[in-house]
Amino acid sequence: MTVLRRVGLSLFAPVLAVVVALVISSLVMAALQVNPLRVFEVMLDFGETPAQQVTAIVVIVNRAIPLFLAGLAVAVAFRMGLFNIGVEGQYRLATIVAAAVGAAVALPGPLHILLIVVVAVAVAACWAGIVAVLKVTRGVSEVISSIMLNFVALGLASYLLTGPFRGSEEGASIISTAEIPESGQLGGLNAVFGAIGLAEPPRQLYGFLPIAIVVGVVLAVLLNRTRFGYDLRVSGLSPSAASASGVDARGMVIKTMLLSGGVAGLVGLPDLLGTTHSYTTDFTAGLGFLGIAVALLGRNRPLGIAFAALLFGFLDRSLVPLQIADFPASVVTIIQGTIVLAVVVANEIARRVARRNAERGSGQAPAAVAGDGGTGPDQTSGGPAGPAGDLDQRQGARA
Amino acid sequence: MALTGVTGDGAAPAAPAGEAYAVQLRGITKRFPGVVANRDIELRVRRGEVHAIVGENGAGKSTLMKTLYGMHRPDEGQILLDGREVHFKSPADAIAAGIGMVHQHFMLADNFTVLENIVLGSEPTKGVRLDRAEARRRIREISDRYSLGLDPDDLVENLGVGARQRVEIAKVLYRGATTLILDEPTAVLVPHEVDELFGNLAELTREGLTVIFISHKLDEVRRVANGITVIRRGTTVGTADPRTTTVRQLAEMMVGSELPSPETRTSTVRDEPVLVLRNLTVRTVEGRALIEDVDLTVRAGEVVGIAGVEGNGQAELVDAIMGLRPLASGEVHLDGGTTGDGGSAGLEDITGWSTRARREAGLGFIPEDRHRQGILLDAPLWENRILGHQTLPPAAKGPFIDRKAARADTERIMAAYDVRAPGPDTLAVALSGGNQQKLIVGREMSSNPRLLIAAHPTRGVDIGAQAAIWELLKDARAEGMGILLISADLDELIGLSDTLQVMLRGRLVATLDPAQVTPEELGGYMTGARTAAGAA
């Protein structure tokens, strides 16, 4: 009973959000004289042959991997009340530097890939570190500085791409860095499908999948089971109580931003190592911003983020079929947008329900949100809704 | 002891039976989960008087005023304005009924003019445009009538604190308020501004307005008020006539003397000091001293009580010892605990240590505001159990948190310290204030600190929990813990302390023997009416 209630309540907000978003987007579609039922049908249609269906799943998962990583990067900062909007710039800059380094060296296979990963993580962490340093030394809001640094990072990436890291021919229509040699490419996992008796799709399932899963598990353990994670979550729940308990607020901001940035550095790697093998002018953009939505929907828990990333991957996959069926692709954007809005509202509702339950039911089963560390709903709503407030408190505590 | 001019309920200075009070509250009770914030409040305010409501912080003054201003609804009781019962659903209803609130913290937009700030929210319009001429005329009229001395076109950012407060007053008058609630209006003012404010209040009442004045500064209350109602522990304990009541009598009413006794008598004070402060000075960023040259020693088995009117540097002193606030100068020394052969390791200079290092070295902390510093409301009890002790057993296992051991130890604390809750996974928000406080006390005691800082350890808890916490502090003292007790409850201070220090404007101004001193004398030292030289 209690377990059921607990699971029920933690699922309540995201499910409610998705349902509300579907209803609102149906209304919008109806207003645009598009039949929403037909749209949903197209979105759910994975094709007739097994090969087509497996391909559709591969496309969804391949898209979900970077979204999952971006969601994790945002969530780590959210959990301590920091709003890292800079994931976009962090991963773009990290990816181009990693692509250039990867193309410039020749190392045996695993080492080569490891080097690329380490470079990407280091670059993104440093970039996020600027935000942290500005915050602890000058009190600059991380929201402002990370947005601004996005512009700087994108500009810097363009400069590097057209200047020192340029690998493509003069006059080529798409400018790119030099291709990473074979030893630095990560093979696909399609053999898995063969092994479990499914048709091997023409597209490769990214070999980065296991790495992403490991990162997710490590972060879940780090946040919920370690002293560091405890300090981080306490800082998010109550900066003043954290300081009084001996958490060094400044140090925590720096460590958390470095961690968040480090994870952000991985965001571009599934695509880079799996398919493109070089950074180009049309390299996947916008993952950082989608990551914020994914983190919100997943309530800042790694497992939730994984599901949210799969949902967003599913929505993104339907872009092409929708266009083929002559529906406006913006339908997907509308659904994604309404999910984000609905999830913010639903999280707040869930938080109030949980609080009221807790306040009322001293004799009853303990509060539902206690689940995995017990920081869920307040955290999710506190992150986006009140970064400014949190900031003030922290600065107050420091002054 | 009978108080002159102090009366119980029915005997309030008799108004003719038919005459209605401007504001009358009957039997107001307001409950929050786990606490009764107000109980059976009786308040009668006549038209044209300045009526003061006095009580300690946390006595329930603010809750009461929020009820009167429509910010929440009472669970029981009636509000009568001019004899008619009213029900406020929101502050808008209260404003419509002529009640205005001047908040302690000003709610003004700095880069707007006085006029713009005053009309904000109730702008006079001509068509769709703001009718500045009309607004200016009315503001001039209000300003002249009550001698507020405001120029509608001044920018608020150019005004001093006193003038800003007058803008706030003009704001509520502009909305047609006939009853003004002033929440601790003098807290932000310097003395001559206080005089000006009192002049303004006299103008207001001369024009027939009613002022409700909330304060805990008793001398000011006696200067300005025509009537006083005293609140203690959420209920009105009586009214007093400022002309015939002394500050001492008021203080006695505020603090009360029929409380359960926190007394400890046999001394357990040992020789070795556990905390020594030398020339401790803390300044604001602007360089104003918050605490100045504080020298203090707490010995093992000793309770040192710090008495003082709130805001005289006690909070800063606690922060300085905890390492939460940088020192301008001075040193903090803490006993390093016992060595292997049972002897003391001696004092260590912890001035430069982080808060965490201090806590690990044996500094326990019961914070003044538990919701701000002591507890995570949205976290389960076991996570609250390890808050502040997350680097020590049973919480820590290498770099990991030992959740099982933490839960088990939470259950132990719940049993040993009578924390009433379903289990270690309950959210802290589900507990009453008293149970939250017992959890905090239990957790701080469990690490066997050398020195415990107990800031208002029984604030906002019911009588039962209060007695339990007092017992725990006495037991710890008997076992050789040094305790620094900060409290506003004079009986608690006198009853528990072995030594009393009085803090006034950031300095320790008197050292008293709690066996000799009465609450009245102590109150005198706290307000500066008595000095160490004069009495000792």
Image (tube, coloured by chain):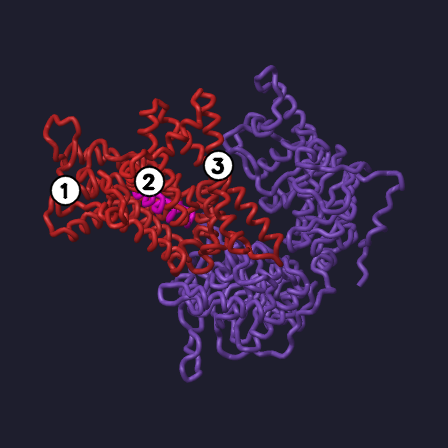
Chain colours: A red, B purple
Give the residue number, with chain letter if any, for mark 3. A19
- Pinpoint the chain carrying mark 1: A
Q: Amino acid at mark 3?
A: Val
- Identify which residue is drawn at 46% across, 68% down: B405
Q: Are marks 3 and 2 in contact (CB under 8 Å)?
A: no
Q: Which element carries disc 1, helix, strand or loop?
A: loop
Q: B278 above or below A150?
A: below
- Pinpoint the chain carrying mark 2: A
Give the residue number, with chain letter if any, for mark 2. A86
In magenta, the rendered stretch is: A63-82
Relative placement, left or right, of B415 versus A15 is right
Relative placement, left or right, of B411 versus A110 is right
Q: Residues within 10 Å of mark 2 (few under 14, many from 20)?
A: many
Q: CA distance from mark 1 to mark 3?
A: 43 Å
Check residue A180 in the rendering and tell me which mark sits there, or answer none: 1
- Identify which residue is drawn at 44% across, 75% down: B337
